[in-house]
Image: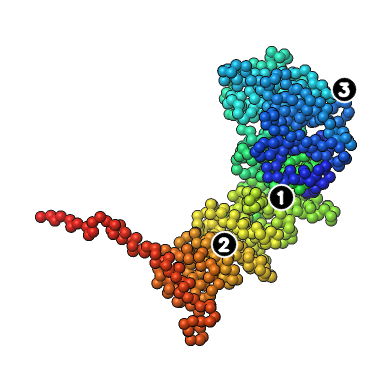
Amino acid sequence: MKLRQVSDLSDFSRGHRLRELLCRGEGPSHIQSSPDGQHLLLLQKSRPPTLPRVLAFQRHSIAGADLERSWQPPQPALVGLLFLQSPVVLGSWVLAVVWEHGRTEVWHFVVAVGWQLLQTLELCQGARARVVSVCSQGASLVWCEERPPLGAHSDMSKCAFRFCVCARALEVGEQGVRLGTVRIVLHNSPEYQVLASPQHVFLVPAAAGFATTSKFLLIWQPEKAEFTITAPSAGFIHSKVLRSSSESDFRKLLLGSVGLLSGFSPLDIHTVTVSNSGGLLLVSTKGSVNIVEPDGTQRHIFDLDGSPLAQGSPVQLKTFGSILACVLAGVLYLVDQNSGRLVEKEVLSMKEVHFLESQGEEDNIQLLSQTGIYSFSFSKPEDSSRPEPCLVEMVFEEACRYYQRRSLSSSKLTVEKLKKGGTFQAPVVLTAILQHSLHQKQKPARGLQDTYAKLLSTMSLELQSYMSLELLKTCVVCAPESEVESYCKELVEQEVSRILQSDMDKDNLAYLNSVFASFPKAAWKATRSCLQLQQNGDGLLVARATPEVWKKVLCQPQLEEVGQNGMVPLFELICASFLRFKPKWLPSFVELTQQYVSSSWSYSSKEGPEGRVPLYKRALGVLARKSKHSEADDEMELELLLCSKRPKAVLQALHLLIRLKQWQRVVEVAEKFSKLSPLLNKEIFITLLAEFAQHRELDPYLDRLWPLCPAELTASDILTMVLQHLPHSQEDPVPFSSEGNQLTVGLLKPLLQRVLQRPSVQDEMYSDALQSTTFPPPTPPREH
């Protein structure tokens, strides 16, 4: 999969304005493209005062009127921006702008003229009605409206069912726009969000609904006037045809299913959208993606990585053919809807993206970002199940190596012994499953044993990943020279991801070393993808890798396994990639790794990676192996030492800064790290006091240096240390030097005054006795 920029927004009318709106901190609340892909519609919300604005931007613009609508409270809010088909001209469309009080503006775009307001209509019949949700299906509008009760003190249980779902045709003709009659789809209902597919309308209960009504979904088929009740936790429940308005009562619809529905758990919905296949995509707060089909059946597709989703964290979904595209926290997931297999996973560099319609191209994904429109192209393999003739032999050879490593016997295990022995059943079962699945598309599948079939269902995703990898290897061999690099990048990413999910033994480590040496740039990108490395909004490096991946990264082989033919551990490989392609991220990566170590292993544990060599020293070892040393390497060494926050490393960094004569940073480091521990504070102060005694470079910073003096140091201790570090002069000492670089008592006076004015340790020990009301204490009575 390759990212390609197709537009920098300069081909849009008022492209600079579009870029400005996209780059704002709060961002547009809604972005929608027209059916022909030539217009972008933005619903922009500003922070207080709330001033939503609707703006339209045309691609390849010719002079004409722009569309820009703005309003202020107390005018009702905007509910929906909908594109409807126009029956007058084939392929033409109109834009309906629907407001909360039911007023609807119908706009039409004419080439060389621009946007024209065709007509303003009233959607609702009642003056007190309020539209809460609206969608379009073909040339009709479907909406859910609130009908407040007439009485001021009505029963609240009855007021809960004060909503009504309606439908109305919107006809655009040569004489103008005309609304059809209102059709009551469902009345006396709770609040619903309506979403339309080509043949169905999904009714999703609002988040603030009652517990009983928030356990199921409703699906309405307009052609048959049929309602289907379904619950994602149970699937299809009941369907009923409502032939008359008297039957379209919400309570009558549920009659007979109330007892069954009461036992279901409430809906867990974070994000909802309609797929191009007509199903309803649901994302739960746990990151589970499911699809509800129009017939009421439910199917699990995929689980997103990471912790439970917060209510405010956006999740974007869009289907392109059989591929489901999902963007969460800057990561793009491409999932096969039919199998649930993860086709691609890409860490995006854009801060915020929006999916756009791809005209007639199901294998092309378009993303709108602050810098332009980008396209992802992916190809679906025509046949990814062509078996390799030596695949079965490969399984047995791998099994031989696996069992040989774990065997206590000295005799060598061969493939022939493995096939004839009958002791090890795992490779036999695996080869049977592989032969069954690989030949499935070429000829009718042979029956599998029940136990094999269960294992096949468990391994289905791994088998599909294997077939995709084999197909990609074939593409690398057969591809022209111009396309080999892109295929190699994808192949390296899959190989690195595969190895990080398997045992990190000597063979896999040697293989990774060769991959990083042969394809350094592709290996770097694969590592970023596997560790999910990216910068957050504050510019800090974050990683969303799983604990299993972290353990593989930190795996440090035995000493006899390292150093053979230049083989280095994976952590060092990654550090070398950072130094080559993103050196500024290396200290942050080491710090992230240390945070994982501290949360997974106890301090100085022999089992943990820090029990052998600290991570910052391993990273410094990679830095030391560079052929040329520069000033940037000194800065990198400083950052690596300081990011570890270990006392020895901090003192080493302090001495390095002193050697480089960077006195401002010396004082900053001392102030920052003296707070970590009293012992480190004392070592830092003694080091700087010794420097102060030898030269006058620290004199401008004495007012920041003296507050770091530890409490246990006395005036005599300070004078002793100063005398020990005074520079030795070749000449006889004189009372008044003309050079002006000698240490004087005046420079030490503020420090000595500070030390002498604070209470001593002995004073604090005897303070209780000294503050006693009677001193000395009375003599205890004698016993006679």
Closer-to-camera residue (264/431)? 264
Which callout, 2 or 3, points at the residue further toward the start of the chain? 3
Task: For the C terminus, give its image quadrant.
Answer: bottom left
Residue at 80% x, 39% y is 57
Dot 1: what SS?
Answer: loop
Q: In the rendered view, does 45 fall on the left or right side of 726?
A: right
Q: What amino acid type is highlighted by mark number 1?
A: Ser
Colour scheme in use = rainbow
Q: Position of residue 161 (x, y in %)?
A: 62, 20
Q: Which residue is mark 2?
A: 642
Q: What amino acid type is highlighted by mark number 3?
A: Gln
Mark 3 or mark 1: which is in front? 3
Closer-to-camera residue (496/330)? 330
Between the residue at mark 2 and the residue at mark 3, the CA separation in whole angstroms equals 76 Å
Residue 381 in view? no
Q: What amino acid type is highlighted by mark number 2?
A: Leu
Mark 2 or mark 3: which is in front? 3
Dot 3: what SS?
Answer: loop
Which callout, 1 or 2, points at the residue further toward the start of the chain? 1
Q: In the rendered view, does 410 fall on the left or right side of 82?
A: left
Residue at 75% x, 22% y is 122
Quick check: 565 above or below 550? below
Closer-to-camera residue (630/763)? 763
Q: Which mark is residue 175?
A: 3
Quick check: 494 above or below 445? below
Outermost residue toward the left in this view: 784
Q: Position of residue 408 (x, y in %)?
A: 57, 56
Q: Which residue is mark 1?
A: 349
| Displayed quadrant of residue 63 | top right
Is mark 2 in CB contact (under 8 Å) with mark 3? no
